[in-house]
Image (cartoon, rainbow, N blue to C red):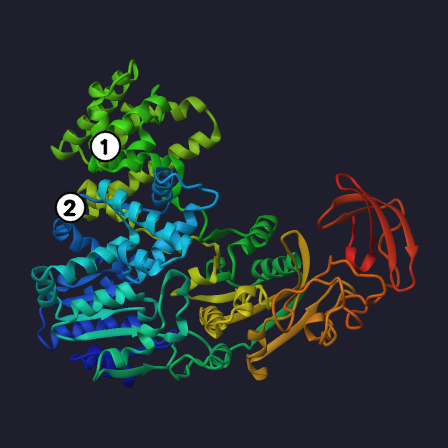
Amino acid sequence: MSIYESLNPMQKEAVLSTEGPLLVLAGAGSGKTRVLTHRVAYLIEEKGVAPWNIMAITFTNKAAGEMRERVDRLVSQGAEAVWVSTFHSSCVRILRRHIGWLGFDTDFTIYDADDQRTLMKQVLKNLELDPKQYRERAMLSQISSAKDKLISPEEFELNAGGDFKLQKVAQVYKEYQKQLKKNNALDFDDLIVKAVELLEGCREVREYYQERFRYIMVDEYQDTNYAQFKLVSLLAGKYKNLCVVGDDDQSIYKFRGADIKNILSFEETFPGAKVVKLEQNYRSTGHILNAANGVIRCNEGRKDKKLWTENGDGEKVHFRQYDQAYEEADGVVKEIRDGDWNYKDCAVLYRTNAQSRLFEEKCLLYNVPYRLVGGVNFYQRKEIKDILAYLRTIANGRDDVSVMRIINVPKRGIGAASVSKAEIFASANGYSMYDAFARVRAIPSMGKAADKIQKFVDLIEEFREKISGGEYGIPELIEDVLERTGYKADLESEGEVEAETRLENIEELVNKAAAYEAAAEEPSLGEFLEEVALVADVDRMDDSDDRVTLMTLHSAKGLEFDNVWLCGLEDGLFPSMMSINSDDPGAIEEERRLCYVGITRARKRLTLTAARQRMVNGETRWNKVSRFVDEIPEEDLDESRLETRFSGKSISFDDSGLPWNRPARPAGVSTFGKGENAYASRTASFSSGAAPGFGKAFTVTKADRLEYGVGDRVHHIKFGDGTVKEIKDGGKDYEVTVEFDTAGQKRMFASFAKLKKL
């Protein structure tokens, strides 16, 4: 049987449509990677296209690796010649060959976010701008946004007009780019920008790659920004055989510059484009898909499609509303612990990174192994950054950021005053910092520091000679750097557990270098540093360990799990307060697409959770259940609107009188945003005679008796352990006075306090 016979009719149509522009609208779990790989196989085996004439672009190294493996399995010969890589990797490959046209050396350094911040500090210092007023992150964000739209510093300056702040940003942008060029460095955005600049400005290079890539396929097209769109358009400009695969319903990276219009207007941009819809889902059950369809159809800015499956209905989507956020985390982790499944088949997804804390604490409490995606990146750890800075200095002496990081690490007696003199010398003569250090004897008044700097330069030059002369590989270079610089001895002298951990991390870097050399055809230091620079957090996920995955919804895109808990489904949190209050209707639609992504990560079982109260900025806020829950069809939802500890059993809670459902607010009660109030503060003060903010809707059910009495030891979730001093029967509730061990004396209502007898 032909490999193409296993495809469903729409998948087959997408595979066989090889000529001209093609838009494949691939719903979640519809087998888009299968379509892409079979299309590559079909072009080579049936159409006789040379493998080197095919380019496939993805967004992550992991996706590129999976595609590469599948193509290798499908195609008998020549698959290795197909260009399969990420946007950034593709651009690096092009720039390594041709960036000389733009005035850079081919051994340029790629700056990560940490390097960018370091450089921006220097830029603000050069321009004598107050870093408190002009913050590094804000400056970098605006520059990144401009680069996504291919706006140059000069164009940015023109667009700024009479706006003083924007003029300052333009000034910073111009200086930032100047320093990057001086350091022979590019940031991530520049990889795309410079590739576009090269293709637009150099006809010879453009025609070479247009001829080379006669068939181009782009995955996750809904996540492309304008610069990426322009790059693809230039590459496909001659043959027009451009196939883009994506799902407008999964466009969730607007904050990174992604432009949903790229996919929505594809047919207008590329006249004569064919559209194929993949709507059959192979991942999830019927109830999960009905929930996803129910939510996403509320969006207006989308192409119509409806996911369906032959997998059966499965379990209904579970919804549980808890009283407190800590109860939500407790309930979720207990359910994971007690369930009949492997931990690695479970994922807890949430809207913001801050939500992870409670889930981590409960995982530790109940001894549930977990992995946190989105924590401190391995390559951002201090010791790793230090060693990489040595390697980058060896590879590219013009990289001032790296040189300045290591000039006195470990401490070698080179003080700030000596470095400052070198900076002045470098600036006056147009040298890089490394070049200035190499000419240290020519710098006035350096004193004893000159010998120490010269020793550093000599050491770097020795490393450079050994690696370029093939005396040893990258793992041996790292070991040599550790020994000869004294870095290892410096760590060992600390004699702490932390120091041991750091050495173990460096050992892991050595392992990474060894693995790279084993896999690379022609290993080089520059290529190794490039590979390290392009690594993403999700790419490094190891799913072999039996651990629960904790991650944000944005990180979860492209992944799937048997069991998913989607947490914090409250208006104001998800959708976010910013999107609720935004004048742009597209803001809520982006949040809804994010919810759709979360729902469609689940294969067999999906649980949605919310908390009625959540601490935000030290204040307890009452939360309305997310509108996204209400958009799920009733017949697909198994819901428990409130699980409470007031009575020890689940109750249905009527929220009709709460602040978000009342026409007016009483004086003194905080409201956030417009229209319906999504968050209301419990700690707000009430003016004299004003009705309480929660009116009649919240009626406390007084317990028949308390499980504790005067003199008993009790525990409170916030204040810790204490002793009950007094209990008063207040009619509607008991008023309890507790002397806490650390928080002092507190008076509270029993129903709210939820004190636990020790």
Q: Extreme front residue here?
A: 162
Write the residue at 29% across / 13% down. 448
Whether residue 60 can be seen here: no
Q: Is residue 700 left or right of residue 557?
A: right
Residue type pointed to by label 2: Thr
Q: How many marks?
A: 2
| Residue holding disc 1 | 477
Q: Considering the numbered disc 2 on the image, is that residue within a helix, a strand or a loop? A: loop
Residue 189 x, y percent position in the rendering: 29, 55
Instruction: Answer whether labels 1 and 2 touch (C-beta < 8 Å).
Output: no
In the rendered image of this protein, does residue 372 appear above or below residue 660? above
Residue density around tag 2, few if under 14, some if 14–19, many if 20 or more, within 10 Å: some
Q: Nearer the viewer, residue 226 or 208?
A: 226
Residue density around tag 1, few if under 14, some if 14–19, many if 20 or more, within 10 Å: many
Q: Is residue 652 left or right of residue 361?
A: right
Residue 55, by quadrant, is: bottom left
> Which numbered disc covers residue 740?
none
In the rendered image of this protein, does residue 111 appear above or below residue 38? above
Q: Considering the numbered disc 1 on the image, is that residue within a helix, a strand or a loop? A: helix
Residue 489, by quadrant, is: top left
Residue 432 x, y percent position in the rendering: 23, 34
Point out the image quarter for the N terminus: bottom left
> Which numbered disc covers residue 106?
2
Give the mark nearest the N terminus, 1 or 2: 2
Q: CA distance from mark 1 to mark 2?
A: 22 Å
Of discs 1 and 2, which sits in the foreground? 2
Q: Nearer the viewer, residue 518 or 750?
A: 750
Q: Nearer the viewer, residue 581 or 245?
A: 581
